[in-house]
Amino acid sequence: MQYYTPYLQWIDQQKESMLELVKSWSNINTHTFNLKGLNVQIEALKKEFSSLGGHLQELTLPPFFHIQDDGTRLSEFLGKALHIVKRPEAPLRFFFSGHMDTVHAQNSPFQRASIKNKDILQGPGACDMKGGLVILLTALRALEQSSFAANVGWEILISPDEEIGSPGSKAILERAARRNHLGFVFEPAFFDGSLVLERAGSINLTVIARGKSAHAGRDYEKGVSALFALTSILVKLESLNSKELTINAGTLLSGHSFNTVPELAIAKINIRSHSTEAIYNAQKMLDTFIEEELEKRCQGGLKPCTIEIHEHSVRMPKTNTKETEQLMSWIEECGTHLHLEFGHKSTNGVSDGNILAMHGLPTLDSLGAIGGEIHTQDEYIKISSLSERAKLVALLLMKIANHDFIPTSPHKRFHNKDT
Ligand SMILES: [Zn+2]
């Protein structure tokens, strides 16, 4: 432990500056579609992260599309991602994942960070996950000061679109998962300090039914109700809900008057489970229900009726593996050294950790700040968790870099260069 003590003590001296950084970043509105705010944030991040000395660049992401109320697709620009790489030739490479966007809208009254008491800072994105970004920055600064850093390489992606399912950064995350060996995600820890071991998978879909409009009195039989078509599918979908599978129809848009057969209906659906198989089955059943409905409503092809599915985000479950259990046991051992007690649990929430795990990267998730009420106007962090978690992460990284911890079952692409 004595090798590591000076760097951990250095982190203890950073408490004030860590808090100031979280406050100032929390005061920047970075709602996913506030491109101006995201630009300000990326400049602020560059100013700090450039001190790590890696190769830093801004990445332009492909536009994201969403379905408008009239059923057409609308493309929207996303903010830029920050990407930093250092020592990519190292035999062991870490991947660090974070996001700079939040769910707090530009017109929300919740725009500023404020200290509530000695250990609580409330602020938009303070917990999810600007606190986590400060923890990552500080832990890496500590690692880079040490001689152990020379043994490892690393790569950071700080994305601007995690809160909408990472549509633009997904491909970059997938490639990073394939070329690195261990992944670390800085989403918030639970209020009691627990880390996330397993995450459910989650898929967001829009289903659009198109029928034929007609006057409900004069020409009812000439119409095809998109609303009835879609709702009968939704009723069948609901029946699939079980202990291991949740299907939620979040919105339904259709029709405009009592006496018109609606020609368009749009439903936004979330499918969620800890079982990959259950998610695939639900998708298959949705296809079957659609086929049944088309057969019923488009008899002999005489009546026009179409039903289409748009996939917005697909994140399969992050399940427990031997490698993630090993990472968890290492970090718990580091916690014991630092007199920090915490457990681990599973959650129904998803993160970019799901994408990394889907592509085979052993990933430790929720290394960010301890806090709660995320995605609400009461979002807060425990201030003391900033330096505690930075020490925890720094110690883990230094121990791996110093071969105190050696992956027993290295990632299968361990010595591969980039793909
Ligand atoms: Zn988050």
Image: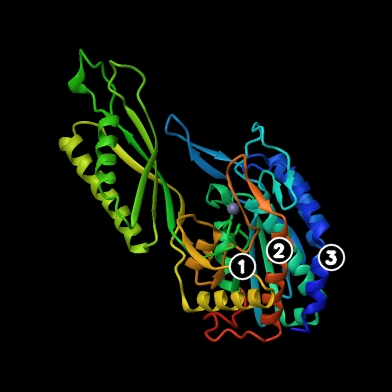
- The spot of residue 3 in percent (x, y) is 78, 84
Local crowd size for mark 1, using a 10 Å CA cut-off: few (<14), some (14–19), many (≥20): many
For label 3, the SS is loop
Task: Tell me: 354 left or right of 7.
Answer: left
- Hey, which residue is sitting farthest left in the picture? 300
Verify CB contact (< 8 Å) between mark 1 and mark 2. yes
Q: Which mark's residue is nearer the viewer, 2 or 3?
A: 3
Q: Does the residue labelled 1 lie within 8 Å of ligand 1?
A: no
184 vs 341, nearest the viewer: 341
Quadrant including the C terminus: bottom right
Q: Which amino acid does label 2 sit on?
A: Leu
Please state which of residues 158 and 167 is positioned toward the viewer in this rendering. 158
Q: Residues within 10 Å of mark 3 (few under 14, many from 20)?
A: few
Name the element at disc 1.
strand
Q: Nearer the viewer, residue 334 or 27?
A: 334
In the image, what residue type sits under mark 1? Phe
Q: How far apart are marks 1 and 2 (CA)?
A: 9 Å
Residue, x 54% and y 72% (percent of image)?
Answer: 361
Q: Mark 3 points at which residue?
A: 13
User: Does the image show residue 82?
Assistant: no
> Could you tell me the amino acid type at mark 3?
Gln
Q: Is residue 364 left or right of residue 294?
A: right
Judged from the image, the secondary structure of the residue bearing numbered disc 2 is helix
Q: Which of marks 1 and 2 is nearer the N terminus?
A: 2
Task: Kindly report the distance in space between the C-alpha atoms of the residues bearing marks 2 and 3.
Answer: 16 Å
Where does label 1 land, which residue? 184
Tag 2 residue: 136
Q: Residues within 10 Å of mark 2 (few under 14, many from 20)?
A: many
Give the Cα separation between the discs numbered 1 and 3: 24 Å
Q: Which quadrant of the rendered structure holds the N terminus?
A: bottom right
